[in-house]
Image (cartoon, helix red, strand yellow):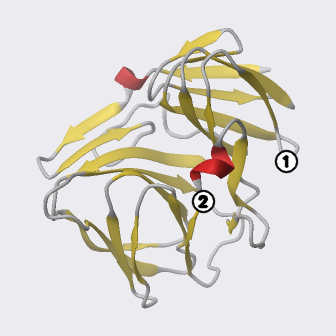
Amino acid sequence: MKTVFHRSSDRGHANHGWLNARHSFSFASYYDPEKVHFGLLRVLNDDIIAPGMGFGTHPHDNMEIVTIPLKGALEHKDSMGNIGVIKPNEIQAMSAGSGLMHSEYNHSKTEEVNLLQIWVLPKEKNIEPRYEQRIFSEKEKEGKFKTIVAPVKSDDVMWINQDSYFSIGKFKAGTSIDYVIQHKGNGAYVFMIEGESVIEKQSLSKRDAIGIWDTTAFSIELKSDSEILVIEVPMK
């Protein structure tokens, strides 16, 4: 087993006034040669967007993009004709594929929106662009990991053009859980959305992360009530 620990306070930081962003990996003006990617996970941005503000229309291609709102409401529009608003417990998955244009704005004029936006390199390039959003209930995540994104098309998960799995769980203090790698050879990037845990002897707090690979499973001990995101990706 191999691991890499990323402390929350060591993330890249850019405050543009309307946007307060923290980058787990090199992004925009932030560059760290030790944090360019984890396997095929390329971007994990923790963004806070001011009321009524957002990202104007801009292009993407050949990237799998997953957006997870943590607080507030995010409005999305794209060149495929999709218009929607996503809130906590909703997830957005988009295959940029051969290319599309989209915009993202804080839907509220009075409250901030906090979201995680995650980019994974695709398995197949230049596919037809695709957009999906779905609600996952709090109950589905209580005391277990609920897989929300996977390389399969079904009613239970959202599809991604990569051998990648995204799982979220909410756990009580004093409990423990094992995470089993779902695709042979994948690594797992474990991101503490909230709470405190110990993973393979490494203590993690809110927004800390640990990458784990060359293993088939690992254990998580919860030191406080916690919410955890696991992003499983091919390592090459």
- Where residue 173 appears, x then y in whole percent? 60, 19
Say which residue appears at 68% left-offset and 21% top-offset: 3
Query: Disc 2 residue type?
Result: Phe
| Residue corresponding to mark 2 | 136
Say which residue appears at 65% left-offset and 45% top-offset: 141
Say which residue appears at 71% left-offset and 64% top-offset: 157
Local SS, label 1: loop
Local SS, label 2: loop
**166 is higher (above) or lower (below) than 76:** above
Say which residue appears at 58% left-offset and 35% top-offset: 228
- Where residue 30 appears, x then y in whole percent? 31, 39
Residue closer to the observer: 62 or 119: 119
**174 is higher (above) or lower (below) than 209:** above
| Residue corresponding to mark 1 | 183
* Quadrant location of the N terminus in the rendered image: top right
Query: Residue lying furthest bottom in this view?
Result: 81
Determine whether, in the image, residue 211 is placed left or right of residue 28. Answer: right
- Where residue 46 appears, x then y in whole percent? 38, 43
